[in-house]
Image (cartoon, rainbow, N blue to C red):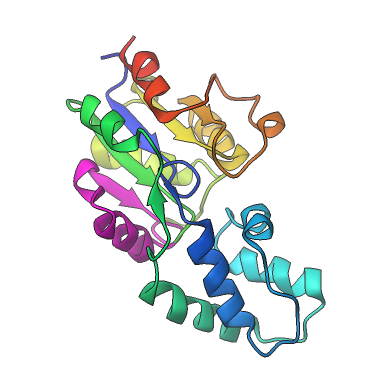
Amino acid sequence: MAFKLIIFDLDGTLVDSSIDIANAINYALDGMKVPAITVRQTITLIGEGITRLFEKIIENYKLHADKDMLIKRFLEHYSAHIVDNTTVYPGVKETLDALKGCSKAVISNKREDLSIQALELLGIRKYFDLVVGSDTTAERKPSPVPVQHVLSRLGVKPKDAVIIGDSNLDIEAGKAAGITTIAVTYGYRPLNILKGANHIVNSMPEIIKIVKS
């Protein structure tokens, strides 16, 4: 196998969590007299972590609101309903099964405990040697720090690792850490911002040939 370590993004790459995140956002905003956030809007807002998510919402809606209170309400709802509507993308489990024999990790800008919770409830935590969230390391994607953390923890050189994600944040983090990058087109971000990736695929099973060649 060409790569010894395969790193995956979570939301928009392994799973579609957009409905549950949208529902938690709207729960947090209940009573704020703003229009409900749609799933489509949610997809454009997420990816940089929960703090940045609510900074953007407060800015976009010009809210006079306590950011920490909104985050607390979001987490209250989201942790209790984290996979009510969240699904594993087609081909993900089959791909993970096909990649036995190499180390696998998740790097998410979702908090570590929530990332692990979602993976466990969806039945795919068992595939991963390590799960890194937004609060695991001092910096989060697009910083290379989470990638470097995984490389160090699992004892893998950059040339032997690849990161797979649906966002420019994943691609930038991977490139900054000196590893190969694969972008998936079915996630939350448009194709035009993924063109810096070494490879672009339209479905998860397409990565098998790339990482094994």
Q: Is residue 157 left or right of residue 141?
A: left
Q: Which residues are magenta?
A: 111-136
Query: Residue at the location (54% across, 71% down)?
Result: 23
Q: Is residue 145 left or right of residue 120?
A: right
Percent from the top left, x then y, of residue 98?
23, 25
Percent from the top left, x then y, of residue 86?
41, 57
Placement of 15 over or under 209, stated as above or below: below
Query: Residue at the location (51% across, 54% down)?
Result: 139
Query: Residue at the location (63% across, 41% down)?
Result: 189
Q: Quadrant of the C terminus?
A: top left
**Residue placed most toward the observer, 152 or 185:** 185
Whether residue 127 is in magenta: the answer is yes
**Residue placed most toward the observer, 29 or 6:** 29
Percent from the top left, x then y, of residue 181?
49, 26
**Residue placed most toward the observer, 158 or 210:** 210
Query: Residue at the location (46% across, 41% down)?
Result: 13
Is residue 156 visible in this depiction of the protein?
Answer: no
Q: Is residue 156 left or right of residue 143?
A: left
Placement of 83 over or under 43, stated as above or below: below
Is residue 195 visible in this depiction of the protein?
Answer: yes
